[in-house]
Amino acid sequence: MKNLVLFPMLLSVCLSAHAQTAGDCLKESIEVAISLKISSLSAGDCSHLGIEQFKEIEGTIQNKKRFLKNALASLNSGQKIPARFFMSISENPSELELDKNNLCGVVSKTSAEGAKEIMKDCPAGAGAFQSMLSLSRISESNPNSACSTVNDIKIKACKESQKK
């Protein structure tokens, strides 16, 4: 997570291979942002999470949902979203503003970075993780089960990548 911009604590990425619209891209980015937060808190072991970490996961889920709602409303009304919300620190984001037409193209660059961070123990599984995550709505799950869901997806994605 060291090279990623958070808003607040938000890594927004787009799973461009799966996203069809700016709304889909934003929704998928929220899933990765939440998964990245959970992955960093748990370090692969959900049994070590305490009440504070579960509160942090719940707060992250709520913040991401709020961001999604506001971002979609902005995009749907023709407004733009600052690119700095989606770009890594190392890129020194400019004052570029994103609209429905260029959002996914820009934020998809951080998709691979986020997936690689989550799958750092099995980098070959990053693509499979992205695909599997698109089917699993972490943002809609209970914070108590979100960690085990993310870890299960990581394990399955790694196994899937080893089959290839």
Image (cartoon, rainbow, N blue to C red):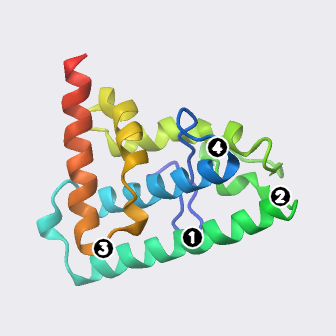
Label 1 Cα neighbours within 10 Å, binned few <14 / some 14-19 / many ≥20: few
| Position above or below: 105 against 85 | above
Q: Are marks 2 and 1 in contact (CB under 8 Å)?
A: no
Judging depth in this view, the residue of 106 and 43 nearest the camera is 106
Q: Earlier in the sequence, mark 2 or mark 4?
A: 2
Q: Earlier in the sequence, mark 3 or mark 4?
A: 4
Q: Give the structural element (helix, strand or loop) at label 1.
A: loop
Q: Residue at x 57, y 44 (%)?
A: 14
| Position above or below: 9 against 55 | above
Camera-side mark, 1 or 4: 4
Residue 80: mark? 2
Q: Give the structural element (helix, strand or loop) at label 2.
A: loop
Q: Which residue is mark 3?
A: 142
> In the figure, is residue 106 to the left or right of 38?
right
Q: Could you say which quadrant of the image residue 37 lies in? A: bottom left
Question: The disc labelled 2 sits on which kind of residue?
Answer: Lys
Question: The disc labelled 3 sits on which kind of residue?
Answer: Asn
Judging depth in this view, the residue of 5 and 16 nearest the camera is 16
Camera-side mark, 2 or 3: 3
Camera-side mark, 3 or 4: 3
